[in-house]
């Protein structure tokens, strides 16, 4: 049986359930507040795995429907580049 304190909510940033609950207890009322303070939802998956779990905790703690919680935006951590840019040869002489 896993200890509740050890349950990982955000695998990308290694944020535990106990950390999320502590932030809510300390006054966080939005997903963006938790995101900024814990770095949850800011990893490679951009919250695809943890966003709903955090929203459920907010809903439960503040007794509001999950639909009333504003989801955060997806912001990819990198700029996309074309395959052509990757395939170009290095024309510089060495």
Image (cartoon, rainbow, N blue to C red):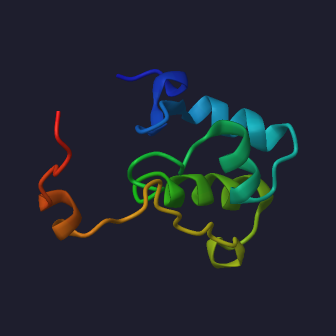
Closer to the camera, 54 or 65?
A: 54
Residue at image x 17%, y 69%? 84
Residue furthest to the front: 93
- The percent position of residue 53, horizontal first and vertical second, equals 51, 54
Task: Answer with the quarter of the image where residue 80 lies.
Answer: bottom left
Residue at image x 39%, y 53%? 45
- The percent position of residue 21, horizontal first and vertical second, equals 69, 38
Q: Quadrant where the N terminus lies?
A: top left
Image position of 33 with respect to 48: above or below: above
Closer to the camera, 5 or 82?
A: 82
- The percent position of residue 72, horizontal first and vertical second, equals 62, 66
Q: Is residue 6 left or right of residue 80?
A: right
- The percent position of residue 4, horizontal first and vertical second, equals 51, 27
Q: Is residue 67 left or right of residue 83?
A: right
Closer to the camera, 55 or 84?
A: 84
Image position of 93 with respect to 69: above or below: above
Q: Is residue 32 left or right of residue 87?
A: right
Residue at image x 52%, y 67%? 74
Residue at image x 41%, y 60%? 48
Q: Quadrant where the C terminus lies?
A: top left
């Amino acid at each position: 049986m896993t200890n509740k304190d050890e349950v990982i909510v955000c695998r990308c940033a290694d944020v535990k359930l106990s950390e999320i609950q502590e932030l809510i207890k300390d006054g966080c009322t939005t997903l963006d507040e938790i995101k900024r303070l814990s770095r949850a939802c800011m990893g490679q998956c951009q919250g695809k795995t943890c966003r709903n779990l955090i929203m459920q905790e907010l809903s439960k703690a503040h007794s509001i429907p999950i639909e009333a919680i504003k989801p955060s935006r997806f912001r990819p951590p990198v700029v996309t580049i074309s395959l052509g840019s990757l395939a170009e040869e290095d024309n510089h002489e060495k």
